[in-house]
Image (cartoon, rainbow, N blue to C red):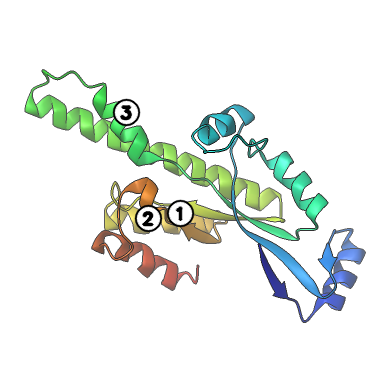
Amino acid sequence: MLYCRCPIVARLREWLTRTGGCFPIMGNECILDIYTHVFRTAEIGRQALQSCPRPRPWEGVIDELRATMREAGIWRSVITTITPTQTMREKALALLPADLSHESRQKAEAEIRERMLQHMHHHNLWGCEVGRTCSEFLPFINLDPVLMDAVTIRQKVRDTVSKGARGIVLHPALHGFYGNDRRVWPVYEMAQSFHL
């Protein structure tokens, strides 16, 4: 967790009191949780977290996060909707028949890629919707520069920023790239131009 000094705490408290908001503060500190995974349902959360080395009582649903924030006095949480596209893609590719023609295989791989991108975009839009309806959550979108070309990256960032995205999460280990990979440069460019 990140603790950040808030020089206008008194004014924020006053405003939140007038508007009926809640503003948990430790002294003159606002607590901002800078990285939480959230899932649409408890079932999806359990499935996503099953590979964790230690069993966790956490399912990653919004109500659970909200209760944890209240209990811990956390003011805001950055929420991420990570989509493990590389793993999903590998599993889908492994299911393709070995005797496919070259042309059929290319077509099937393109369809798999498109499904992965749609899945990721769907998750990103859900995170943006949560952020729009619940001000305590700051949605960060997830991008996969291995599956996305520069045009797609730019389009997805523009689209999700217009829907409330506040930042971008890159997960090199999960998507199979390094931070200095040229395919990531459009992500950095968009983050810089939108001040994400």
Residue at (26%, 21%) from the top-left corner? 95
According to the picture, the residue beneath numbered tag 3 turns out to be 91
**CB under 8 Å between discs 1 and 2:** yes
Residue at (44%, 41%) from the top-left corner? 83
**CB under 8 Å between discs 3 and 1:** no
Marks 3, 2: nearer the viewer = 3
Three-letter residue code for mark 3: Lys
- Between residue 89 and residue 156, name the one nearer to us: 89
Marks 3, 1: nearer the viewer = 3
Label 3 or label 1, whichever comes before in sequence order:
3
| Side of 102 where 163 appears, left or right | right
| Side of 20 where 97 appears, left or right | left
According to the picture, the residue beneath numbered tag 2 turns out to be 155
Residue that extends furthest to the front in the rendered view of this protein = 54
Label 3 crowd bin: few (<14), some (14–19), many (20+), radius 10 Å: few
The image's mark for residue 159 is 1
Three-letter residue code for mark 2: Gln
Q: Where is residue 185 shown, x and y percent of the image?
A: 30, 66
Whether residue 133 appears in this view of the structure is: yes
**CB under 8 Å between discs 3 and 2:** no
Whether residue 115 appears in this view of the structure is: no
- Between residue 151 and residue 91, name the one nearer to us: 91
